[in-house]
Image (spheres, grey):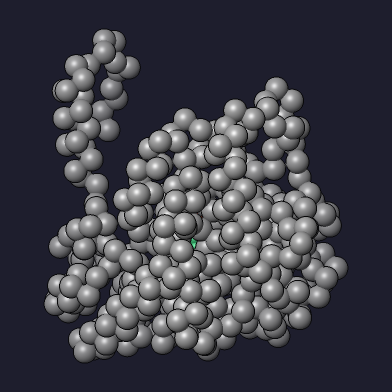
Amino acid sequence: MKRRGFPKKGMDQSELMSRIEEIRSKDTDFADGTIFGSMCTSPLDMAKKVHGLFLETNLGNPGLYRGTLELEKEIHSSVASLLNAPEGYEALSVGGATEGNILALWSSREKTGKRKVIIPESAHFSFKKACNLLDMEPVMIPLDDKYQPDLSTVEEEIDDDTAVVVAIAGTTELGLIDPIHDLADISGDVHLHVDAAFGGFAIPFLKEAGYSLPEFDLSIDGVDSIVLDPHKLGMSTIPLGLYYSREEHPIAIESPYLTGAHQKTIPGTRASASIPAFWSVMNYLGFEGYVSIMERCMNNTRTLLMKGKEIGLEPIVDPVLNIVSFHHEDPVRVVETMERKGLSISRTVNPPGLRFVVMPHVTEESILKMIPILEDSI
Ligand SMILES: Cc1ncc(COP(=O)(O)O)c(C=O)c1O
Protein backbone atom coordinates (compact mmCIF):
# COMPACT_ATOMS: atom_id res chain seq x y z
CA MET A 1 0.00 0.00 0.00
CA LYS A 2 1.24 3.47 -0.87
CA ARG A 3 2.66 5.20 2.20
CA ARG A 4 0.46 8.12 3.30
CA GLY A 5 1.73 11.13 5.15
CA PHE A 6 0.32 11.94 8.60
CA PRO A 7 -2.53 14.40 7.91
CA LYS A 8 -1.28 17.98 8.31
CA LYS A 9 -4.60 19.74 8.43
CA GLY A 10 -7.93 18.51 9.76
CA MET A 11 -10.50 17.25 7.27
CA ASP A 12 -13.99 18.60 6.80
CA GLN A 13 -16.33 16.53 8.97
CA SER A 14 -18.91 15.69 6.32
CA GLU A 15 -16.18 14.74 3.84
CA LEU A 16 -14.61 12.59 6.52
CA MET A 17 -17.89 10.87 7.32
CA SER A 18 -18.66 10.13 3.70
CA ARG A 19 -15.21 8.52 3.36
CA ILE A 20 -15.88 6.48 6.50
CA GLU A 21 -19.27 5.36 5.17
CA GLU A 22 -17.74 4.40 1.84
CA ILE A 23 -15.02 2.39 3.56
CA ARG A 24 -17.47 0.74 5.96
CA SER A 25 -19.64 -0.39 3.06
CA LYS A 26 -16.71 -2.57 1.90
CA ASP A 27 -17.03 -4.64 5.10
CA THR A 28 -19.32 -7.64 4.97
CA ASP A 29 -22.52 -7.32 6.96
CA PHE A 30 -24.03 -10.24 8.90
CA ALA A 31 -27.46 -9.05 7.71
CA ASP A 32 -26.49 -9.70 4.04
CA GLY A 33 -27.00 -13.44 4.54
CA THR A 34 -23.57 -14.15 3.03
CA ILE A 35 -21.52 -15.07 6.11
CA PHE A 36 -21.46 -18.81 6.85
CA GLY A 37 -17.98 -19.13 8.30
CA SER A 38 -17.96 -16.89 11.37
CA MET A 39 -18.34 -17.81 15.02
CA CYS A 40 -19.42 -14.25 15.75
CA THR A 41 -22.79 -12.81 14.83
CA SER A 42 -24.64 -9.55 14.73
CA PRO A 43 -25.16 -8.44 18.33
CA LEU A 44 -28.70 -7.49 19.28
CA ASP A 45 -29.46 -3.85 18.36
CA MET A 46 -29.82 -3.05 22.01
CA ALA A 47 -26.30 -4.33 22.68
CA LYS A 48 -24.92 -2.01 20.01
CA LYS A 49 -26.79 0.93 21.54
CA VAL A 50 -25.64 0.20 25.07
CA HIS A 51 -22.07 -0.41 23.86
CA GLY A 52 -22.05 3.10 22.41
CA LEU A 53 -22.94 4.59 25.80
CA PHE A 54 -19.86 3.13 27.50
CA LEU A 55 -17.14 3.76 24.92
CA GLU A 56 -14.79 5.52 27.30
CA THR A 57 -15.10 3.10 30.20
CA ASN A 58 -11.93 1.33 31.26
CA LEU A 59 -12.10 -1.30 33.98
CA GLY A 60 -8.31 -1.32 34.01
CA ASN A 61 -8.92 1.67 36.28
CA PRO A 62 -12.06 0.43 38.03
CA GLY A 63 -12.45 3.12 40.69
CA LEU A 64 -13.41 5.60 37.97
CA TYR A 65 -16.16 3.39 36.54
CA ARG A 66 -18.13 2.16 39.52
CA GLY A 67 -21.33 1.71 37.50
CA THR A 68 -19.64 -0.43 34.85
CA LEU A 69 -17.93 -2.39 37.63
CA GLU A 70 -21.33 -3.10 39.20
CA LEU A 71 -22.57 -4.55 35.90
CA GLU A 72 -19.38 -6.60 35.55
CA LYS A 73 -19.99 -8.15 38.99
CA GLU A 74 -23.56 -8.95 38.01
CA ILE A 75 -22.58 -10.71 34.78
CA HIS A 76 -19.83 -12.63 36.56
CA SER A 77 -22.31 -13.86 39.11
CA SER A 78 -25.10 -14.73 36.65
CA VAL A 79 -22.78 -16.62 34.30
CA ALA A 80 -21.19 -18.36 37.31
CA SER A 81 -24.57 -19.88 38.04
CA LEU A 82 -24.98 -20.91 34.39
CA LEU A 83 -21.63 -22.74 34.70
CA ASN A 84 -22.32 -24.21 38.15
CA ALA A 85 -19.30 -22.45 39.64
CA PRO A 86 -18.63 -23.42 43.26
CA GLU A 87 -18.11 -21.02 46.20
CA GLY A 88 -14.77 -19.25 46.05
CA TYR A 89 -14.56 -19.14 42.24
CA GLU A 90 -12.79 -16.29 40.50
CA ALA A 91 -14.24 -14.63 37.39
CA LEU A 92 -12.29 -12.37 35.04
CA SER A 93 -13.50 -10.48 31.97
CA VAL A 94 -11.11 -11.00 29.10
CA GLY A 95 -10.87 -9.94 25.47
CA GLY A 96 -12.01 -13.36 24.26
CA ALA A 97 -11.21 -17.03 24.62
CA THR A 98 -7.64 -16.55 23.37
CA GLU A 99 -6.89 -14.45 26.43
CA GLY A 100 -8.78 -16.88 28.68
CA ASN A 101 -6.77 -19.80 27.31
CA ILE A 102 -3.53 -17.88 27.91
CA LEU A 103 -4.62 -17.14 31.51
CA ALA A 104 -5.35 -20.83 32.15
CA LEU A 105 -1.92 -21.96 30.94
CA TRP A 106 -0.17 -19.09 32.69
CA SER A 107 -1.94 -19.91 35.94
CA SER A 108 -1.02 -23.61 35.71
CA ARG A 109 2.64 -22.75 35.03
CA GLU A 110 2.71 -20.24 37.89
CA LYS A 111 1.21 -22.73 40.36
CA THR A 112 3.29 -25.77 39.41
CA GLY A 113 6.45 -24.47 37.73
CA LYS A 114 5.74 -27.12 35.06
CA ARG A 115 5.56 -26.54 31.33
CA LYS A 116 3.93 -29.44 29.53
CA VAL A 117 0.48 -28.76 28.04
CA ILE A 118 -1.70 -31.65 26.83
CA ILE A 119 -3.75 -30.38 23.87
CA PRO A 120 -6.19 -32.31 21.64
CA GLU A 121 -5.44 -31.84 17.95
CA SER A 122 -8.94 -30.41 17.60
CA ALA A 123 -8.03 -27.44 19.82
CA HIS A 124 -8.09 -23.85 18.61
CA PHE A 125 -4.76 -22.37 17.51
CA SER A 126 -4.84 -19.99 20.47
CA PHE A 127 -3.21 -22.76 22.56
CA LYS A 128 -0.18 -22.76 20.27
CA LYS A 129 -0.04 -19.00 20.67
CA ALA A 130 -0.26 -19.39 24.46
CA CYS A 131 2.50 -22.02 24.56
CA ASN A 132 4.76 -19.89 22.43
CA LEU A 133 4.13 -16.82 24.58
CA LEU A 134 4.56 -18.65 27.88
CA ASP A 135 7.44 -20.86 26.75
CA MET A 136 5.37 -23.95 27.48
CA GLU A 137 5.57 -27.24 25.60
CA PRO A 138 2.49 -28.33 23.62
CA VAL A 139 1.92 -32.09 23.46
CA MET A 140 -0.65 -32.71 20.75
CA ILE A 141 -3.09 -35.56 21.28
CA PRO A 142 -4.30 -37.36 18.14
CA LEU A 143 -8.01 -37.78 17.53
CA ASP A 144 -9.81 -41.10 17.32
CA ASP A 145 -12.16 -42.10 14.50
CA LYS A 146 -14.91 -39.97 16.07
CA TYR A 147 -12.62 -36.90 16.06
CA GLN A 148 -12.35 -36.97 19.85
CA PRO A 149 -9.01 -36.90 21.73
CA ASP A 150 -7.55 -40.35 22.13
CA LEU A 151 -7.87 -40.93 25.88
CA SER A 152 -5.21 -43.61 26.15
CA THR A 153 -2.64 -41.21 24.64
CA VAL A 154 -3.71 -38.52 27.14
CA GLU A 155 -3.14 -41.04 29.94
CA GLU A 156 0.30 -41.97 28.58
CA GLU A 157 1.38 -38.37 28.09
CA ILE A 158 0.47 -37.03 31.55
CA ASP A 159 3.59 -37.14 33.68
CA ASP A 160 5.40 -35.23 36.44
CA ASP A 161 6.15 -32.33 34.07
CA THR A 162 2.53 -31.78 33.04
CA ALA A 163 1.09 -28.39 34.01
CA VAL A 164 -2.33 -28.56 32.37
CA VAL A 165 -4.69 -30.65 30.26
CA VAL A 166 -6.97 -28.91 27.76
CA ALA A 167 -10.53 -30.04 26.91
CA ILE A 168 -12.89 -28.44 24.43
CA ALA A 169 -16.62 -27.91 24.64
CA GLY A 170 -17.51 -27.00 21.08
CA THR A 171 -14.52 -27.61 18.81
CA THR A 172 -13.84 -24.95 16.22
CA GLU A 173 -13.92 -27.25 13.21
CA LEU A 174 -16.72 -29.68 14.04
CA GLY A 175 -18.49 -28.31 17.12
CA LEU A 176 -17.80 -31.47 19.14
CA ILE A 177 -17.72 -31.74 22.92
CA ASP A 178 -14.78 -33.64 24.40
CA PRO A 179 -15.47 -36.37 27.01
CA ILE A 180 -14.75 -33.95 29.83
CA HIS A 181 -15.75 -36.32 32.67
CA ASP A 182 -13.23 -38.88 31.38
CA LEU A 183 -10.55 -36.23 30.91
CA ALA A 184 -11.18 -35.03 34.47
CA ASP A 185 -10.72 -38.59 35.80
CA ILE A 186 -7.52 -39.08 33.82
CA SER A 187 -6.08 -35.66 34.75
CA GLY A 188 -6.41 -36.30 38.49
CA ASP A 189 -4.69 -33.40 40.29
CA VAL A 190 -3.38 -31.85 37.09
CA HIS A 191 -5.16 -28.60 36.10
CA LEU A 192 -7.96 -29.27 33.60
CA HIS A 193 -8.97 -26.27 31.51
CA VAL A 194 -12.13 -26.30 29.40
CA ASP A 195 -12.28 -24.11 26.30
CA ALA A 196 -16.02 -23.49 25.98
CA ALA A 197 -15.55 -20.42 23.75
CA PHE A 198 -18.25 -21.70 21.42
CA GLY A 199 -20.19 -24.27 23.45
CA GLY A 200 -20.51 -22.26 26.66
CA PHE A 201 -23.46 -20.25 25.43
CA ALA A 202 -24.98 -23.17 23.51
CA ILE A 203 -24.87 -26.33 25.63
CA PRO A 204 -26.86 -25.15 28.69
CA PHE A 205 -29.66 -23.83 26.48
CA LEU A 206 -29.79 -26.85 24.18
CA LYS A 207 -29.98 -29.15 27.20
CA GLU A 208 -32.99 -27.19 28.36
CA ALA A 209 -34.49 -27.63 24.88
CA GLY A 210 -34.19 -31.40 25.30
CA TYR A 211 -30.91 -32.09 23.46
CA SER A 212 -28.91 -34.82 25.10
CA LEU A 213 -25.51 -33.22 25.68
CA PRO A 214 -22.85 -34.04 28.25
CA GLU A 215 -21.80 -31.93 31.24
CA PHE A 216 -18.90 -29.64 30.44
CA ASP A 217 -18.58 -27.03 33.17
CA LEU A 218 -17.56 -26.48 36.79
CA SER A 219 -20.17 -28.99 37.95
CA ILE A 220 -17.47 -31.56 37.10
CA ASP A 221 -15.14 -31.72 40.12
CA GLY A 222 -11.94 -32.08 38.08
CA VAL A 223 -12.54 -28.98 35.94
CA ASP A 224 -10.28 -26.19 37.24
CA SER A 225 -10.98 -23.40 34.78
CA ILE A 226 -13.23 -22.58 31.85
CA VAL A 227 -13.63 -19.82 29.30
CA LEU A 228 -16.67 -18.87 27.19
CA ASP A 229 -17.37 -16.02 24.79
CA PRO A 230 -20.29 -13.59 25.08
CA HIS A 231 -19.06 -12.17 21.74
CA LYS A 232 -19.88 -15.45 19.98
CA LEU A 233 -23.15 -17.22 20.89
CA GLY A 234 -23.63 -14.84 23.84
CA MET A 235 -24.97 -12.48 21.14
CA SER A 236 -23.08 -9.48 22.42
CA THR A 237 -20.45 -7.09 21.17
CA ILE A 238 -16.75 -7.70 20.63
CA PRO A 239 -14.55 -7.99 22.67
CA LEU A 240 -15.73 -10.10 25.59
CA GLY A 241 -14.75 -13.47 26.98
CA LEU A 242 -15.38 -14.68 30.53
CA TYR A 243 -12.76 -16.74 32.33
CA TYR A 244 -13.63 -18.68 35.49
CA SER A 245 -11.30 -20.55 37.78
CA ARG A 246 -12.26 -22.75 40.69
CA GLU A 247 -9.55 -21.16 42.84
CA GLU A 248 -8.26 -17.62 42.90
CA HIS A 249 -6.17 -16.74 39.84
CA PRO A 250 -2.56 -16.81 41.10
CA ILE A 251 -1.18 -13.85 39.14
CA ALA A 252 -1.99 -10.32 40.31
CA ILE A 253 0.30 -7.51 39.21
CA GLU A 254 0.23 -4.38 41.39
CA SER A 255 -1.09 -1.29 39.59
CA PRO A 256 -0.10 1.39 42.14
CA TYR A 257 -0.97 4.53 40.17
CA LEU A 258 -4.46 3.35 39.22
CA THR A 259 -7.63 3.09 41.30
CA GLY A 260 -7.46 -0.72 41.50
CA ALA A 261 -4.77 -2.36 43.62
CA HIS A 262 -3.76 -4.91 41.02
CA GLN A 263 -4.57 -6.36 37.60
CA LYS A 264 -5.05 -10.03 36.79
CA THR A 265 -5.75 -9.91 33.06
CA ILE A 266 -3.37 -9.09 30.21
CA PRO A 267 -4.41 -5.64 28.96
CA GLY A 268 -3.78 -2.59 31.11
CA THR A 269 -6.43 -0.28 29.74
CA ARG A 270 -9.43 -2.53 29.24
CA ALA A 271 -12.12 -1.67 26.63
CA SER A 272 -15.19 -2.28 28.79
CA ALA A 273 -18.25 -1.27 26.76
CA SER A 274 -18.95 -4.89 25.86
CA ILE A 275 -19.64 -5.60 29.55
CA PRO A 276 -22.80 -3.43 29.84
CA ALA A 277 -23.69 -4.52 26.30
CA PHE A 278 -23.64 -8.16 27.37
CA TRP A 279 -25.45 -7.34 30.63
CA SER A 280 -28.27 -5.86 28.56
CA VAL A 281 -28.43 -8.84 26.15
CA MET A 282 -28.44 -11.35 29.00
CA ASN A 283 -31.19 -9.53 30.86
CA TYR A 284 -33.22 -8.83 27.74
CA LEU A 285 -33.16 -12.37 26.36
CA GLY A 286 -33.05 -14.27 29.62
CA PHE A 287 -32.38 -18.02 29.70
CA GLU A 288 -35.55 -18.64 27.69
CA GLY A 289 -34.56 -16.21 24.94
CA TYR A 290 -31.22 -17.99 24.50
CA VAL A 291 -33.02 -21.35 24.40
CA SER A 292 -35.19 -20.27 21.49
CA ILE A 293 -32.24 -18.73 19.59
CA MET A 294 -30.25 -21.95 19.96
CA GLU A 295 -33.23 -24.09 18.93
CA ARG A 296 -33.53 -22.00 15.77
CA CYS A 297 -29.79 -22.37 15.07
CA MET A 298 -30.07 -26.15 15.44
CA ASN A 299 -33.11 -26.33 13.12
CA ASN A 300 -31.17 -24.36 10.51
CA THR A 301 -28.19 -26.65 11.11
CA ARG A 302 -30.34 -29.68 10.23
CA THR A 303 -31.59 -27.87 7.10
CA LEU A 304 -28.04 -27.13 5.95
CA LEU A 305 -27.03 -30.71 6.70
CA MET A 306 -29.92 -32.11 4.66
CA LYS A 307 -29.41 -29.72 1.74
CA GLY A 308 -25.66 -30.44 1.72
CA LYS A 309 -26.36 -34.17 1.52
CA GLU A 310 -28.81 -33.56 -1.34
CA ILE A 311 -26.03 -32.00 -3.42
CA GLY A 312 -23.74 -34.95 -2.71
CA LEU A 313 -21.73 -33.74 0.27
CA GLU A 314 -20.94 -36.13 3.09
CA PRO A 315 -20.92 -34.72 6.65
CA ILE A 316 -17.75 -35.39 8.65
CA VAL A 317 -19.85 -35.96 11.79
CA ASP A 318 -23.49 -35.64 12.68
CA PRO A 319 -23.61 -32.09 14.13
CA VAL A 320 -23.75 -31.86 17.91
CA LEU A 321 -23.82 -28.07 17.98
CA ASN A 322 -24.58 -25.57 15.23
CA ILE A 323 -21.61 -26.33 12.97
CA VAL A 324 -21.88 -28.47 9.83
CA SER A 325 -18.69 -29.66 8.13
CA PHE A 326 -18.56 -31.79 5.00
CA HIS A 327 -15.69 -33.86 3.62
CA HIS A 328 -13.97 -32.24 0.62
CA GLU A 329 -10.56 -32.93 -0.83
CA ASP A 330 -9.90 -29.35 -1.95
CA PRO A 331 -11.64 -27.00 0.46
CA VAL A 332 -9.29 -24.07 -0.27
CA ARG A 333 -10.47 -23.98 -3.88
CA VAL A 334 -14.14 -24.10 -2.88
CA VAL A 335 -13.73 -21.39 -0.23
CA GLU A 336 -12.04 -19.14 -2.81
CA THR A 337 -14.67 -19.87 -5.46
CA MET A 338 -17.48 -19.08 -3.01
CA GLU A 339 -15.68 -15.88 -2.00
CA ARG A 340 -15.55 -14.73 -5.62
CA LYS A 341 -19.31 -15.31 -5.73
CA GLY A 342 -19.78 -13.12 -2.66
CA LEU A 343 -20.23 -15.88 -0.06
CA SER A 344 -18.00 -16.46 2.92
CA ILE A 345 -17.68 -20.07 4.06
CA SER A 346 -14.90 -21.68 6.04
CA ARG A 347 -12.91 -24.90 5.94
CA THR A 348 -11.66 -27.67 8.18
CA VAL A 349 -8.09 -28.97 8.18
CA ASN A 350 -8.45 -32.23 10.05
CA PRO A 351 -9.96 -33.81 8.00
CA PRO A 352 -10.08 -31.45 5.00
CA GLY A 353 -13.59 -30.17 4.49
CA LEU A 354 -16.05 -27.33 4.09
CA ARG A 355 -17.25 -25.73 7.30
CA PHE A 356 -20.48 -23.84 7.98
CA VAL A 357 -21.18 -22.15 11.31
CA VAL A 358 -24.93 -21.77 11.63
CA MET A 359 -25.01 -18.65 13.78
CA PRO A 360 -28.18 -16.72 14.64
CA HIS A 361 -27.75 -14.46 11.59
CA VAL A 362 -27.90 -17.53 9.29
CA THR A 363 -31.50 -18.04 8.22
CA GLU A 364 -33.27 -20.82 6.36
CA GLU A 365 -33.69 -18.40 3.46
CA SER A 366 -29.96 -17.60 3.31
CA ILE A 367 -29.15 -21.34 3.37
CA LEU A 368 -31.55 -22.08 0.52
CA LYS A 369 -30.03 -19.25 -1.54
CA MET A 370 -26.47 -20.39 -0.83
CA ILE A 371 -26.89 -24.12 -1.64
CA PRO A 372 -27.19 -23.88 -5.47
CA ILE A 373 -24.10 -21.65 -5.51
CA LEU A 374 -22.29 -24.22 -3.37
CA GLU A 375 -23.42 -26.99 -5.71
CA ASP A 376 -21.83 -25.11 -8.65
CA SER A 377 -18.62 -24.58 -6.67
CA ILE A 378 -17.79 -27.99 -5.24
C1 LIG B 1 -12.89 -23.26 20.57
C2 LIG B 1 -12.30 -21.89 20.42
N1 LIG B 1 -11.44 -21.44 21.34
C3 LIG B 1 -10.90 -20.22 21.28
C4 LIG B 1 -11.20 -19.36 20.26
C5 LIG B 1 -10.58 -18.00 20.21
O1 LIG B 1 -11.53 -17.04 20.55
P1 LIG B 1 -11.25 -15.49 20.38
O2 LIG B 1 -11.03 -15.27 18.93
O3 LIG B 1 -12.49 -14.89 20.91
O4 LIG B 1 -10.07 -15.15 21.19
C6 LIG B 1 -12.09 -19.78 19.26
C7 LIG B 1 -12.43 -18.90 18.15
O5 LIG B 1 -13.05 -19.23 17.20
C8 LIG B 1 -12.65 -21.08 19.34
O6 LIG B 1 -13.48 -21.57 18.40
State the residue at coordinates (15%, 62%): 341
Q: Left or right? Give the position of 144 relative to 308.
A: right
Residue 340 vs 67, above or below: the answer is below
Q: Is residue 125 visible?
A: no
Rendering quarter of residue 264:
top right
State the residue at coordinates (82%, 54%): 111
Which quadrant does the N terminus fall into? top left
Q: Left or right? Give the position of 369 relative to 265.
A: left
Q: Position of residue 200 (x, y in %)?
A: 53, 67
The one of 313 and 256 positioned closer to us in this rendering: 256
Q: Left or right? Give the position of 274 relative to 263.
A: left
Residue 357 vs 228, above or below: the answer is below
Residue 308 vs 242, above or below: the answer is below
Q: Left or right? Give the position of 121 relative to 53.
A: right
State the residue at coordinates (66%, 58%): 244
Q: Position of residue 165 (x, y in %)?
A: 70, 68
The one of 229 and 351 positioned closer to us in this rendering: 229
Which quadrant does the C terminus fall into? bottom left
Q: Position of residue 367 (x, y in %)?
A: 21, 74
Q: Is residue 86 visible?
A: yes
State the residue at coordinates (52%, 63%): 197
Q: Position of residue 359 (x, y in %)?
A: 35, 67
Residue found at the very far top of the displayed protein:
9
The one of 129 and 165 positioned closer to us in this rendering: 165
